[in-house]
Amino acid sequence: MPRPVVTLLDVADAEAAETVAQGIRAFNAQRCGPSRSVPLNAILRVDERVVGAVLGRTVYGHWLIEAVWVHEGHRGRGVGRQLLEAAESEALRRGVRGAQVDTLSFQAVGFYATCGFREVGTIPDFPPGHTKHYLFKSYADA
């Protein structure tokens, strides 16, 4: 039997990442059924240029918000809320029971709170001098 070898890399390894992702999906499917992971993105373009987006996916009956961004020149005009509400509408149409997002203390904690999210956890001093916040919104009563 060949001897196992651990390799440390400082670059991405697409093959290893795909093997790991497939392994995790198979393991989870045995315990939870199929994830039914489907991308859910709301993108705002002006003159074909992306000026804002909510990127994520629905999986296991939840909406995972992976990134929210609005170009600096379009902030403060309700664009983020418009994008979030558009994506949320589609998530609800898909039958999600909840939504989750994480953000840093200098980013959008207050924004998510005004959109109905509540904090469920934090990691202090990540990055140093700041806090990482985990937020959740339940649609159980929706």
Image (tube, grey):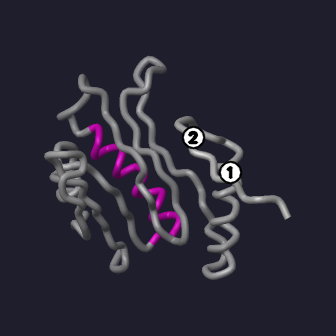
Q: Which residue is mark 1?
A: 18
Q: Magenta segment range?
A: 79-96
Residue at the spot 32% in from the left edge and 55% down from the top edge: 102
Of circles 2 and 1, the one toward us is 2
Direction from residue 78 to residue 69 in the image, left or right: right
**Secondary structure at numbered mark 2:** loop
Direction from residue 2 to residue 16 in the image, left or right: left
Disc 2 or 1, which lies upstream in sequence? Answer: 2
**Residue 18's spot in the image, x, y percent?**
68, 51
Main SS class of the magenta portion in the image = helix
Q: Residues within 10 Å of mark 2 (few under 14, many from 20)?
A: few
**Residue 67's spot in the image, x, y percent?**
39, 45
Q: Which residue is mark 2?
A: 9
Direction from residue 24 to residue 131 in the image, left or right: left
Amino acid type, label 2: Leu
**Quick one: quadrant of the N terminus?**
bottom right
Is 92 magenta? The answer is yes
Q: How far, Cα to Cα, is label 2 from label 1?
A: 16 Å
